[in-house]
Image (cartoon, helix red, strand yellow):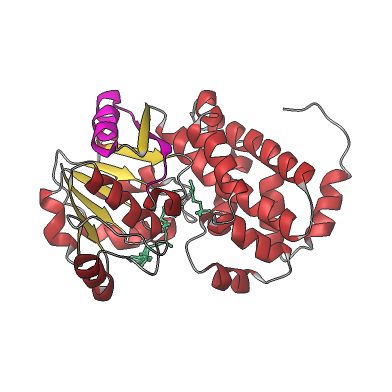
Amino acid sequence: MRAVVIGSGAWGTTFAQVLADAGNDVVVWTTQEAVAEEINTRHTNGRHLPDGTVLPETLAASTDLARLLPTAEVVVVALPSQVVRDVLTPYAGLVAPEAVVVSLMKGVELSTLEVMSQVLMEIWDLAPERMAVVSGPNLAGEIARREPTTTVVACRDDAVAHRIAEAIATPYFRVFTSTDVIGLEIGGAVKNVIALAVGIAEGMGYGYNMVASIMTRGLSEGTRIGLAIGAERETFLGLAGVGDLVATCSSPSSRNHRLGSYIGKGLTLAEAVEATGATAEGAKSCRPILELARRHGVKASVIAAVVAVVHEGRDPAQVVRELHARPPRAED
Ligand SMILES: NC(=O)C1=CN([C@@H]2O[C@H](COP(=O)(O)OP(=O)(O)OC[C@H]3O[C@@H](n4cnc5c(N)ncnc54)[C@H](O)[C@@H]3O)[C@@H](O)[C@H]2O)C=CC1
Ligand SMILES: O=C(CO)COP(=O)(O)O
């Protein structure tokens, strides 16, 4: 298939490699001439991918999205969630009518509380049958090294999910399918916030009991938010739920996990963002996710604690003391 990948960061470039390795005709769109030149001539992306990653020679890069879109059969979007609406609205009308759009993103829009499939369907006027998402335990660096990985592709139309799954399957990328688009997206967005919480706890010096508690309660919060907006419970127990949560909360290479640990060690948000040096969606998405929980009457104490520490300057030790001082209640 002819594919364009919008975004030349860690995941966009790595996913483009997967598509090229799977035999597709792929071009990565970047706004940076130097990055396009590096991918086209040296077959590397030194800013975002691990040392030694050599991209397929068939993988091209371009800065001309308007030229690429009309002929693409698959349009993959891998930008930081908060820029999607502004960056991609001007391209409405250029996506081919039969093309499938695939979101790789794990964030919630601050101004609308929408997940990225909702934003893309709105700005590009797409039917749900043309909108797919990919999510799972997918740390880009490991996939760039072609280490065995599993993922899930979801689309309202099961046949389209299967078509995309076949197009991205490689010997190192095993793909499952789903029709629970919103479940995949909420699972991915919430686990970033939980990875922040785990990082904060680790940065403060807490151990495995605390980490396991945050992950388990975080999964419960994400599941209940998802169920409130139409997701399926099973999704949260699958690769895009527990799977992604375990990968991100365990790996020191997760940007959300790292950002959290800097904050737990006492850095300000601005300092932690600077030290992380790449997109950590949870830092911005925690507030709209908490708002989503509140609107749907879902208790989300871990997510609220992250918002309090990251955005309201609360002392994390005091926030933990307050969480633990609450009266016992039934586990949900
Ligand atoms: N890195 C990973 O392991 C994974 C990331 N994701 C998700 O994929 C999405 C993208 O993440 P990454 O590629 O890792 O981020 P990144 O921080 O590595 O790269 C972001 C890319 O977006 C570009 N960009 C930023 N603002 C832009 C703008 N206004 N216009 C055009 N380009 C712009 C940057 O130049 C950069 O190439 C996020 O939602 C993330 O949560 C999902 C799974 C795995
Ligand atoms: O989503 C991811 C792995 O599935 C990547 O997580 P980070 O954005 O925290 O690196």
Kindly indicate the quadrant of the structure image that contains residue 62: bottom left
Q: Is residue 183 visible?
A: yes
Q: Is residue 125 visible?
A: no
- Residue 135 drawn above or below residue 78: above
**For this rendering, which residue is in front, 246 or 309?**
246
- Residue 66 drawn above or below residue 93: below
**For this rendering, which residue is in front, 70 or 165?**
165
Kindly indicate the quadrant of the structure image that contains residue 265: bottom right
Query: Relative to 34, is 277 on the left or the right?
Result: right
Which range of residues does the magenta coloring cover?
146-169
Quadrant (top left/top right/bottom left/bottom right) for the N terminus: top left
**For this rendering, which residue is in front, 20 or 157?**
20
Query: Relative to 147, is 196 on the left or the right?
Result: right
Query: Which residue is at a point 39% across and 47% down the rendered structure image?
Result: 116
Residue 147 position in % (x across, y down): 42, 45
Magenta stretch: includes residue 151: yes
Query: Which residue is at a point 44% across and 45% down the rendered structure image?
Result: 115
Residue 317 position in % (x across, y down): 82, 58
Magenta stretch: includes residue 239: no
Quadrant (top left/top right/bottom left/bottom right) for the C terminus: top right
Query: Relative to 227, is 301 on the left or the right?
Result: right
Query: Which residue is at a point 26% across and 53% down the rendered structure image?
Result: 5
- Residue 237 drawn above or below residue 60: above
Q: How many marks?
A: 0
Residue 260 position in % (x across, y down): 65, 59
Residue 289 position in % (x across, y down): 57, 47
Query: Which residue is at a point 23% across and 30% down the rendered structure image?
Result: 163
Q: Residue furthest front?
A: 52
